Amino acid sequence: MTLRQSSVRKVRDLDGVDSYEHLGNNTGVNILNTSAPPLDDVRVRQAVARAIDQDAVIDVLGGTGLTPRSTQLFSEDDPRTGPRRSPRPGPPTTPRPPRN
């Protein structure tokens, strides 16, 4: 059974109910065209990524304490994606070149 984040919180509080949880995919995603200006500039994409307050978005959606911050579509333990690196805190020391 799949439940919304707000429902998971309610189920956790029920007496006599055992829940087994697994975070599936994180399907809240934005897809941006990075082949056209201004998003073809890696610095612009980094600025957009840093401008999004993930914790605030998670809070508004009712997932505080339930849903971790994420930078990819699938969770790190999803067998289809393999391990992922955690995002580095703060700005990178040197910008990465754009991907082709």
Image (spheres, rainbow, N blue to C red):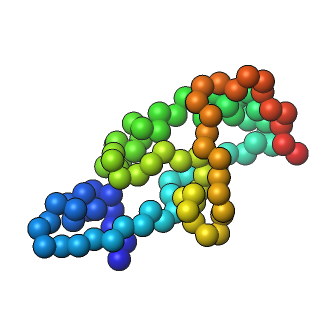
Q: Is residue 47 visible?
A: yes
Q: Position of residue 30 (x, y in %)?
A: 58, 48
Q: Is residue 61 above or below residue 56?
A: below
96 and 60: which is toward the camera: 96
Asked whether, in this view, residue 24 is left or right of residue 3, the answer is right
Q: Quadrant of the N terminus?
A: bottom left
Quarter occupied by residue 50: top right
Q: How many marks?
A: 0
Q: Position of residue 33 (x, y in %)?
A: 73, 45
Q: Residue at x 73, y 22 (%)?
A: 93
36 and 92: which is toward the camera: 92
Q: Residue at x 48, y 65 (%)?
A: 24
Q: Quadrant of the C terminus?
A: top right
Q: Residue furthest right?
A: 100
Asked whether, in this view, residue 37 is left or right of residue 48, the answer is right
Q: Residue at x 76, y 32 (%)?
A: 42
Q: Position of residue 75 (x, y in %)?
A: 54, 58
Q: Is residue 37 visible?
A: no
Q: Position of residue 9 (x, y in %)?
A: 24, 57
Q: Residue at x 52, y 63 (%)?
A: 25
32 and 21: which is toward the camera: 21
Asked whether, in this view, residue 93 is left or right of residue 88, the answer is right
Q: Residue furthest left?
A: 15
Q: Residue furthest bottom?
A: 1
Asked whether, in this view, residue 45 is left or right of residue 36, the answer is left
Q: Is residue 75 above or below residue 64?
A: below
Quarter occupied by residue 95: top right
